[in-house]
Amino acid sequence: MSDLLEKNLKEGSRKRSPKRIIALTAIGAIPVGIGICFIQVPIGCACGNPGIQASGTYLRSQEAYYLEHQTFSKSFKSLKIAPIPDTTTRYLFSTEVISDRVYIHATPREVPTDLFGLGLTKAKIYALVGAVAYDKKRKATDSVLCIAEGSTFDKPPKPVFNGGKFTCPSGFYAR
């Protein structure tokens, strides 16, 4: 009986040798480590797209400013809104003020969403372009905010103002 117990103890210890446990752990850790690199993390809060909010605020402020002063403003201070930063986590913003029109472009940035920020996966961010114009025939302002239908990292084209109404460029839809 004691021979059987000794034999079982020797077999059990041979199967669980430290070298074998380390080797199996290392072999299992490699695919897990590679998989961890592809875990996607969100780029921001779930409170919506801040680019849409910033662009919309800018456009509405320009409309209100024009109705009051009969010109568009070149500064955020006179619009009485917080300045839109040139660069955010998602967008590169640019504004253009012409005598009878205002444009705001939100060009998407390449934002990695993998766990370590290696760029293995990137966020799908849609370009935005907005515009406000004064229609002399109707004596009223018209505005539009266009959102890209697909993800692109190019600067969005300007909306076209024809017949008192804006038309979004191809590949964009109006919000």
Image (tube, rainbow, N blue to C red):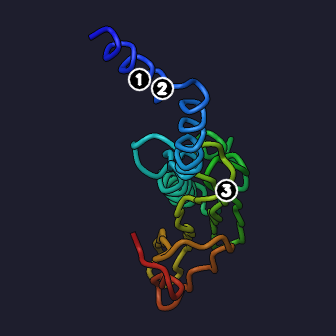
Q: Is residue 143 visible?
A: no
Instruction: In this rendered view, identify the residue nearer to me: 19 or 73.
Output: 19
Picture disc at residue 109: none
The residue pinned by badge 1 equals 12
Pinpoint residue 23: horizontal percent, then vertical percent. 60, 37
The quarter of the picture where the C terminus appears is bottom left
Task: Check disc 2 and give the amino acid type.
Answer: Arg
The residue pinned by badge 3 equals 119
Position of residue 149 in the picture relative to residue 105 (left or right): left
Q: Residue furthest bottom?
A: 163
Estimate the spatial distance between the alpha carbons at disc 3 and disc 1, rounded to whole Å.
46 Å
Task: Check disc 1 and give the amino acid type.
Answer: Gly
The residue pinned by badge 2 equals 16
Q: Residue visible at 40% across and 43% down?
A: 46
Pinpoint residue 142: horizontal percent, then vertical percent. 47, 73
Position of residue 22 in the picture relative to residue 146 (left or right): right
Height in image: 130 above or below 65?
below
Where disc 2 sits, the SS reads loop
Label 3 or label 1, whichever comes before in sequence order: 1
Give yes or no for contact between labels 1 and 2 (Cβ–Cβ under 8 Å).
Answer: yes
Where disc 1 sits, the SS reads helix
Estimate the spatial distance between the alpha carbons at disc 2 and disc 3, rounded to whole Å.
40 Å
Height in image: 15 above or below 175?
above
